[in-house]
Amino acid sequence: MSSLISIVGAGPGDPELLTIKALKRIQEADCILHDALVSDEILNLASPQAERIYVGKIYQDGQNQTDRQEWINQLIIELARKGKKVVRLKSGDPMIFGRGAEEIRFCIENGLNYEAIPGVTSALGAASLHGIPLTERGKNSMVLFGTGHYCEGDFCDLETFVSVLKSGSPVVFFMGLNKLVRLAGRLMEQAISPETKVQILSKVSQTGSSATEGTLGNISQLLETQKPPMPALVIIGKNAERLIK
């Protein structure tokens, strides 16, 4: 089979943060299956002849995720059978909350020629661009990536979040802005200090990017007054200081 399925991380949005290999695959693609958060600047790097198919999801868009993924898988196999060079373009990195593993397994199960190309995940991009140390000598030696998802009416990994925060290390929340007020309350109920820093980083590396800095104790008021836009990443931790203002 002459086709190639490239599962590509597009990074947080700025085209200059693409890897060289990702850029090559985008420029060579016959078809690009892209997520909602992939920027127009990156899509415009593709050949004018390349077909672009939107396969994304945005918050509360009503899509059934199982049906959506089955549709994407069907597209991949149909294009592969036509000998196409396909780029499955995902924001950030395919293996960080990106369903990359599901699509790699599908390619393996169907004998497709595939590769995975890393991207700068928004957590690392946001930390570097705003000077927020996720690890720092003498302060902390780990960082936790999590989501604001619920399990049985509470945050799925609340005990783990609390343990990591008490150690002095930060927790980075993907898809957590809409639940941040409740999360702050639950953390404070578990004896996490109200003075613990909270960083809200919106549209990382893109036009209109912004940063909102607060604490667990005042974040509710800040959200009401500043209304940071989505998509946004949230970093919580006593050492989560923003060095670059």
Image: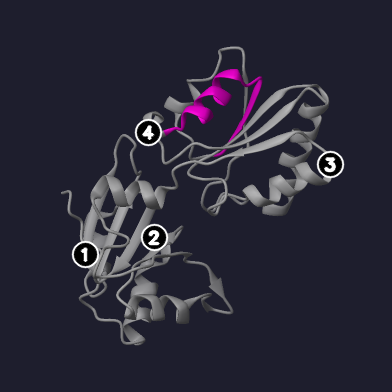
For marks 3 and 1, give the CA distance: 48 Å
Q: Name the residue beneath numbered marker 4.
A: 14
| In this view, 79 is above or below 243 | above
Residue receiving disc 3:
110
Front: mark 3 or 1: 3
Q: Measure how far apart labels 1 and 2 are at the Cα level.
A: 13 Å
Between 29 and 218, the one lying in front of the other is: 29
Circle 2: is it few (<14), some (14-19), or many (20+) Cα within 10 Å?
many
* Residue positioned 59% across, 79% down in the render: 152
Instruction: Quote the CA–CA distance across marks 1 and 4.
Output: 26 Å
In this view, the residue in front, 172 or 61, is 172
The amino acid on which the numbered mark 1 sits, given as a three-letter code, is Gly
Is label 2 or label 3 in front?
3
The answer to whether any part of residue 68 appears in the image is no
Q: Secondary structure at mark 1?
A: strand
Which residue in the structure is indicated by mark 1? 214
Q: For the point 52% across and 30% down, which residue is it?
A: 22
Task: Please name the colour scheme applied to the rendered image.
Answer: one colour
List x then y, in percent, for residue 104.
Answer: 70, 45
User: Residue placed at 23% from the left, 51% from the top?
Assistant: 131
- Say left or right for 131 vs 51: left
Do tag 3 and tag 4 residues touch (Cβ < 8 Å)? Answer: no
What's drawn in magenta, residue-wise?
18-35
- Between discs 2 and 3, the one toward the N terminus: 3
